Amino acid sequence: MRLALAILLAALATPTLAARHNKRPEHPSPRTDEPKPLGTFDDWTAATHLEGGQTVCYAFTRAKNSAPKLPGRGDVVLTVAERPGGRDAVAVSAGYAYPPNAQVTMSVERHEVPFYTSQRSAFARNGRAAVADFRKANEAVLRGPGPHGKGNVTDSFSLRGFNAAYAEISKACPAK
């Protein structure tokens, strides 16, 4: 689980994280920015992480199925984040770079949730609506263009355990 959190946070890291690692003290002190697991809930994991001195809470899961299989593709991760400055940020780390201005849509039951893309990630245009849909469904299916705009890629995510993971991050990072 620690490796999974490290992979997720590397995908979501800010540029300041890289700068912080360029100079290491002779006697390193214990790291306070390490992810802190809150628990695993069926197919979802919840954790907190310090970002810019503020606690950020994440719930995430990996794709259960992806088609077609793409050689060299990285992890495909669906994440919901609660930050002091923003609630219900829904993102997918695709494991490859999307073409510019890619059209990506997530189907949750009978609802379509539009996403915008930036490099290797896609972001829900309305995270609050996406979370409301996740709370009532069993599965979410993301569809978008493959690498270099060739073909289409479909990723399926289980929503089993989402409600419990979401409750845990909401408790750890309450709305203000």
Image: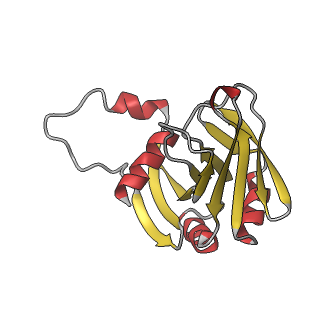
At horizontal 36% and vertical 51% (from top left) the residue drawn is 34
Vertical side of 2 occupied by 152: above or below: above
**Figure quadrant of the C terminus:** bottom right
User: Which is nearer the eye, 33 or 77?
Assistant: 77
Vertical side of 68 occupied by 18: above or below: above
Quadrant assignment, res 37: bottom left
Where's residue 151, x and y in %? 71, 34
Vertical side of 91 occupied by 103: above or below: above
At horizontal 69% and vertical 29% (from top left) the residue drawn is 150
Where's residue 95, x and y in %? 54, 40
Work out whether residue 83 can be spotted: no
Q: Is residue 59 left or right of residue 124?
A: left
Quadrant assignment, res 5: bottom left
Where's residue 173, x and y in %? 56, 62
At horizontal 63% and vertical 59% (from top left) the residue drawn is 157
**Figure quadrant of the N terminus:** bottom left
The residue at the far left in this view is 26
At horizontal 61% and vertical 30% (from top left) the residue drawn is 119
Work out whether residue 116 can be spotted: yes
Instruction: Describe the colour scheme in one phrase.
Output: secondary structure
